[in-house]
Amino acid sequence: MPMSLTEQMFYCATRVTAYDGGKLIGTGTGFFYRVILDDPQKEIPMLITNKHVIEGADRIGIAFNLANEAHSGPSGEIVSGRIQFRDEVVIKHPDPAVDLCAILIGEGLEWAGRTGKAPFYYPIDKRLIPTYEQVSKLDAIERITMIGCPNGLFDHANNLPIARSGYMASDITKPFQGRNEFMVDIACFPGSSGSPIFVYDPNGGFERGSSDYHLKTKFYFVGVLFEGPTIDLDGEVQLSKVKTFSISSMMHLGLAIPSIECLVFDAWVGEAQRKGLVIIK
């Protein structure tokens, strides 16, 4: 039986653990992305996350679900390993203000495939990224779904991330605070950084500029979470004397990078091919 869109979303993201010299320095979320080459049988597999998730790391740890014999779903088996960083492995978004990077994971897929079973995942590609015209038709407030690993939490037994739902908190057609980002009304915690965000509404909805209700399912990859604003709260602790302290609390809001910025990695592959660089065996 084919997987539904929501089932597929669970298999597009994974937890990322960052290491430096063998020491765990942080966790985040990454999602599988592919650049489809001119030969449709070939593609460049990547894991996209935020730059800050892997900052200071010399390797990352990820785990793959393995496919069943029919390649129609997961077999229930999981294989994990680490990807060492080299200059040609990590591609950083050229704009320092855009907190995105891509990690070439071909080697990781190879060691996962040595089990005799292919890795099972659903990669995102440019076909899920809405065009400027499609974005312009999204309503100012849209229902969204985010897939990630808040505070490093995920389903260890099934190697699956966590889904969170919410709404657009700012108009995606208007850069929030004049920056290349938008705000989402969704529970965001450390570890959620790098989570893909989808506009997903199986009931369709209205399009901006139209009073007609469209029954077609809305499904777009619209952004990548990179930050969650916090608020400082003053409180009192009653000890031997009154002490004032300040704590930070998440505001159930997040900031996201528009998904169209991921096309930089498609362009990188195209440029590498023109230069004759070998990026796929």
Image (spheres, rainbow, N blue to C red):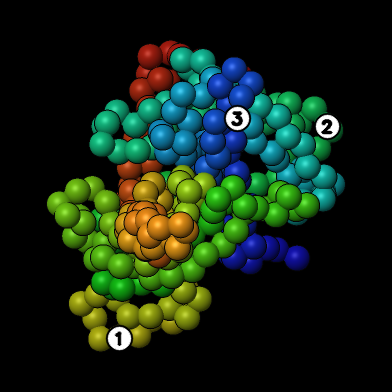
Q: Earlier in the sequence, mark 2 or mark 1?
A: 2
Element at label 3: strand
Toward the viewer: 144 or 109? 144
Amino acid type, mark 1: Asp
x 38%, y 37%: residue: 100
* Residue 145 sits above or below residue 45 on the image: below
Q: Quadrant of the C terminus?
A: top right
x 71%, y 29%: residue: 81
Q: Is residue 138 left or right of residue 34?
A: left
Q: Earlier in the sequence, mark 2 or mark 3?
A: 3
Percent x, y for residue 6?
Answer: 59, 65
Toward the viewer: 226 or 43? 226
- Foreground mark, 2 or 3? 3
Amino acid type, mark 2: Thr
Number of labelled discs? 3
The residue indicated by pointer 3 is 24
Mark 2–mark 1 contact, CB under 8 Å? no
Q: Give how far apart the Cα atoms at labels 2 and 1 are.
A: 52 Å
Percent x, y for residue 190?
Answer: 48, 48
The label on residue 115 is 2
The residue indicated by pointer 1 is 212
x 44%, y 28%: residue: 55
Percent x, y for residue 274?
Answer: 37, 18
Whether residue 254 is visible: no
